[in-house]
Amino acid sequence: MSSWFEERRADKAADAEQRRKDREFESTLRREEAREAKKERREEEAQRRRDKANRRQARAARREKTLTPGNVYRKGTLALVAASALASLPAQIMHFVTISVMLLPLPFALEGAAWVMNAGVAYADERKLPAWVRWLLRALALSAAGFAAWINYDYGRHIDPAVGFGLAAVTLLGPLFFEVRQWVMTLSVDPGERKRRADARSRARHEKRRAKHHKEVVLLAKRLVSAAPFGSLGFEEAFVAAWEIFYGTSTPGMTPALHAQQLASRQSLSTAMDEANGSPISARSRLLQRLHPAPSVLVSGLGSSQVAPDLPPASERPQKAAQKGGRKAPPPHRRTKGDAVPFHPIAKTEAALERGGTPRRIPAANGHRH
């Protein structure tokens, strides 16, 4: 019996220990589950805060993008334009309906014409159409808006002069604001785009002047372009070839007459510089002097010496001064044989001709006298 009771107590103790371990395990499991749940709640809360911050940043970015000065100006101008149209239409409708109900579409036609013409100006700027198209559209828009303003003024002045002026001003300010908006947008384009537009205008003016000044060459260049395969010959290359065909030079702008004038100007400049410097400085003049040397001194008459004496003639005053001082004057220079350069052959020829009664000649080389 005792053994059965001991076994029974052991089983109860083992059951109690097992229950304790189970409760401890369940408690640990509940704590871990609670910890995990709390962690998940913290992560979800952090994610909600991050999402909220991202949405706030996105709204701030959209607001910043929307409220830029350019967007405010563009959208504000459109709002003013809409307000102007709404303020000007009732008076026009009442004016025309008073005359006849059949005239009810006229106010909408007038306002629509003004705004369509203004939109046409914007479209012409976008497509880079000629300036006269834009000014024509502006004139049409101003005409429609002016007529609508006159109708509003005529209707409002019967109520009060201020009402008439106010309605007329509101009618005109809408198209005016829209036109100013278009000018500002045109002037605020990218500098690179503005430069490309200016280059395109300058190129168009240049081509117009070229076609006016060189009609025959431009016509031949166009014919060369049309004769060549498509895209194989550019107009500039064709123009250079046409210029060479007409004038014989591949330098556009130069003609035979201009080449002759350039050569004559160079020769005149060379001659003038030679005369100013007293000696030839140009290559042509130096070559002529080397090929045809001129005598150093032209023969002036019979018995004249070809070279000057190497000592100047003594004056009487130094001799007298030397006699007064008791010193002797130096002896006069006496020429000896071989102390002078022989006469040049041309000088001998000229002297022989003069002895024979023939006038003296001046040597010339290649048309240039020396």
Image (cartoon, grey):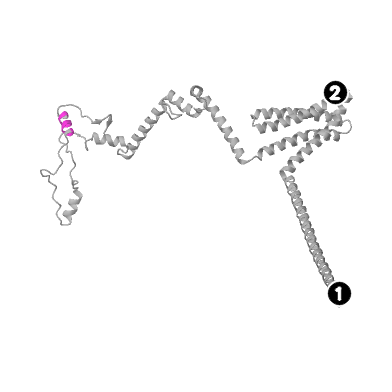
Q: What is the quadrant of residue 84 in the picture?
A: top right
Q: Residue 99: x and y, percent?
A: 88, 23
Judged by depth in the image, the label closer to the viewer, 1 or 2, is 1
**First reached walking from the N terminus: tag 1 or tag 2:** 1
The magenta stretch is 346-353
To which residue does mark 1 refer? 4
What type is the residue that disc 1 sits on?
A: Trp
| Residue 233 among those drawn in magenta | no
Quick one: quadrant of the C terminus? Answer: top left
To which residue does mark 2 refer? 103
Q: Residue 329: x and y, percent?
A: 15, 52
CB atoms of marks 1 and 2 within 8 Å = no
Q: Residue 92: x and y, percent?
A: 84, 29
Q: CA distance from mark 1 to mark 2?
A: 120 Å
Quick one: quadrant of the N terminus? Answer: bottom right
Q: Is residue 277 left or right of residue 363?
A: right
